[in-house]
């Protein structure tokens, strides 16, 4: 019996290994029961999917389970990015969404992410309860069962839709024919949707389109063969922006690489930005919720860099003030800039679900994490690479300056520290030994710097004199530790890395 456990971004597994139709039905049935417990099952569920192998088929299986339970389904007609699916929850006022995506993971993976009614990542009480219900569902499911149930019309409809989708040039579900009536009761419980239109219309209220239209920046878009294909183009092209697009077609194998907008995966984007002298290269991951940027000088801008630039932009250009939220693993350059402007900064555990909670409950106007998630006030409390990319373009248009110049201006206001993260692999026995040591670890000094505070909110975070800090977190799924360090310069980064590993035997 597979152990299906929802983590920060739902449940992910290898297709045809653990990620099977049977397990998808079990998970969907658990979500249906959870919604019934919460008395939200009458509000319907949006079902979205990315560009991965068998995405339409998994979406159809989930749709059938919900329809069997008399829950209305808003089924996306074609692959859609997670942020657009999350916005569809808000747009249709549904009980939530089931998103089939493994985000930036390798192509052999698929995943299920549950997005609750507030259009942001589910919090632990919700995912924990769903996990409990999944275990019950796993005991009940018949592996041979396929799209059957008390509402037998729906499996027939969905099977027909799948057949039509597989023969369609666009490889998408067609719109149901309202005139023939051959789809039967889908008019009551099954609605085909395309979230792109309402989502982009909403973004027109979030992004300053006049600023972009006045400057018309030239950007290169790298969709990385993901579900966000066409979204940035549909927004920027009507404004008159010059665009160049790469990897803008569906490929379930992602060109043999990872749909992860990290620097080492963006060499082609970097080359094109330099060759064409573009003002920015914008890369989106497999489901469009994370952004990577190549500056005009070819430098890769990390999520920490992007967050800092966006904070400066929102304060200077929009005169926004209030609360800024970041995770425990994200740069303290944000703290220093927030203090400079008299803003309150909130630190959360790792996971955008906590950033989304800060946006919803503390009215944070900017929230982000070092792994690439960003959102702002007035938008959905879900990480959104598409919105972040457009906000970055707005920033370039408003500032009429390159990122290097903007960093220089910020550096005149605060001390800019260097940041890095390392994944350190261990054996399972070594991991247990280090975890035991971390539980009681109270360092007094590391690399010649005195310890000011030890924070155990999420992992072990040690604040040092002079503003340096480091965080040690263990992976919940692998035998490895993640080490995050921020220090005034690269030399001190290396000294701290050596000191921490020596002290812990890591």
Image: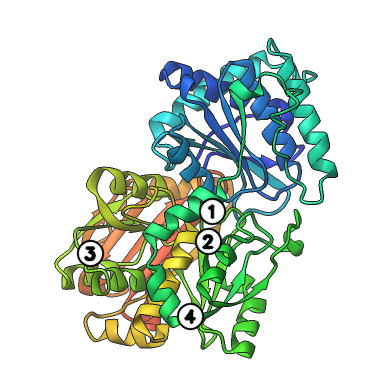
User: To which residue does mark 1 refer?
Assistant: 480
Query: CA separation, marks 3 and 1?
Result: 40 Å
Mark 1 or 2 closer to N-term? 2
Horizontally, residue 28 falls left or right of residue 330, namely: right
Q: Are marks 1 and 2 in contact (CB under 8 Å)?
A: yes
Query: CA separation, marks 2 and 3?
Result: 36 Å
Query: CA separation, marks 2 and 4?
Result: 40 Å
Q: On the image, which quarter does residue 154 sit in?
A: top right
Mark 2 or 3 closer to N-term? 3
What's the residue at 43%, 49% (across, down)? 382
Q: What mark, if any, has residue 320 been given in the picture?
A: 3
Q: Nearer the viewer, mark 3 or mark 4?
A: 4
Q: Nearer the viewer, mark 2 or mark 4?
A: 4
Q: Are marks 3 and 4 in contact (CB under 8 Å)?
A: no
Mark 3 or 1 closer to N-term? 3
Q: Nearer the viewer, mark 3 or mark 1?
A: 3
Q: Secondary structure at mark 2?
A: strand
Q: Residues within 10 Å of mark 3 (few under 14, many from 20)?
A: some
Horizontally, residue 476 falls left or right of residue 250, namely: left
> In this rendering, is residue 132 above or below 379?
above
Q: What mark, if any, has residue 423 been given in the picture?
A: 2
Q: Residues within 10 Å of mark 2 (few under 14, many from 20)?
A: few
User: To which residue does mark 4 refer?
Assistant: 216
What's the residue at 24%, 49% (across, down)? 363
Q: Nearer the viewer, mark 4 or mark 1?
A: 4
Horizontally, residue 171 falls left or right of residue 95, namely: right
Q: Colour scheme in the image? A: rainbow
Mark 3 or 4 closer to N-term? 4
Mark 2 or 4 closer to N-term? 4
> In this rendering, is residue 325 above or below 240?
above
Q: List x then y, in percent, for residue 24.
A: 66, 29
């Amino acid at each position: 019996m597979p152990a299906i456990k929802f983590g920060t971004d739902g449940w992910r597994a290898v297709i045809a290994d653990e990620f099977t139709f049977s397990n998808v039905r079990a998970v969907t049935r658990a979500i249906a029961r959870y919604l019934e417990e919460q008395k939200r099952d009458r509000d319907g569920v949006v079902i979205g999917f990315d560009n991965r192998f068998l995405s339409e088929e998994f979406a159809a299986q989930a749709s059938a389970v919900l329809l069997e339970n008399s829950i209305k389904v808003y089924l996306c007609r074609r692959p859609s990015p997670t942020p657009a699916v999350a916005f569809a929850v808000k747009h249709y006022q549904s009980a939530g969404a089931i998103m089939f995506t493994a985000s930036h993971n390798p192509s052999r993976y698929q995943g299920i992410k549950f997005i609750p009614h507030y259009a942001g990542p589910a919090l632990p009480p919700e995912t924990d309860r769903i996990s409990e219900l999944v275990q019950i569902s796993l005991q009940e499911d018949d592996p041979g069962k396929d799209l059957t149930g008390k509402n037998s019309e729906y499996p027939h409809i969905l099977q027909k839709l799948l057949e039509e989708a597989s023969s369609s040039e666009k490889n998408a579900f067609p719109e149901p024919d309202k005139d023939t009536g051959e789809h039967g009761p889908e008019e009551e419980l099954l609605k085909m949707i395309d979230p792109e239109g309402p989502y982009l219309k909403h973004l027109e209220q979030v992004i300053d389109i006049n600023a972009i239209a006045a400057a018309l920046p030239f950007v290169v878009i790298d969709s990385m063969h993901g579900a966000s294909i066409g979204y940035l183009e549909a927004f920027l092209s009507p404004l008159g922006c010059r665009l160049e697009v790469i990897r803008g077609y569906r490929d379930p194998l992602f060109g043999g690489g990872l749909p992860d907008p990290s620097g080492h995966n963006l060499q082609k984007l970097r080359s094109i930005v330099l060759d064409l002298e573009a003002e920015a290269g914008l890369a989106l991951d497999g489901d469009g919720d994370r952004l990577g940027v190549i500056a005009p000088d070819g430098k890769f801008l990390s999520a920490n860099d992007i967050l800092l630039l966006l904070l400066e932009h929102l304060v200077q250009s929009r005169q926004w003030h209030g609360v800024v939220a970041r995770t425990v693993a994200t740069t303290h350059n944000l703290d220093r800039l927030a203090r400079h402007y008299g803003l309150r900064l909130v630190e959360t555990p790792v996971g955008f679900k906590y950033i989304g909670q800060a946006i919803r409950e503390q009215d944070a106007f900017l929230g982000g994490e070092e792994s690439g998630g960003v959102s702002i006030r007035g938008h959905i409390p879900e990480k959104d690479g598409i919105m972040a990319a457009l906000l970055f373009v707005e920033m370039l248009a408003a500032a009429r300056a390159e990122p290097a110049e903007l960093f220089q201006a910020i550096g005149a206001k605060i001390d800019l520290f260097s940041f890095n993260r390392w994944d350190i692999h261990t054996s399972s026995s070594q991991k247990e030994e280090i975890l035991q040591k971390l539980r009681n670890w109270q360092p007094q000094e590391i690399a010649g710097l005195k310890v000011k505070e030890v924070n155990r909110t999420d992992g072990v975070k040690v604040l040092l004199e002079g503003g340096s800090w480091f965080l040690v977190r263990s992976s919940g799924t692998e035998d490895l530790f993640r080490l995050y360090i921020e220090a005034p310069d690269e030399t001190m980064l290396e000294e701290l890395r050596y000191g921490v590993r020596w002290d812990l035997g890591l």
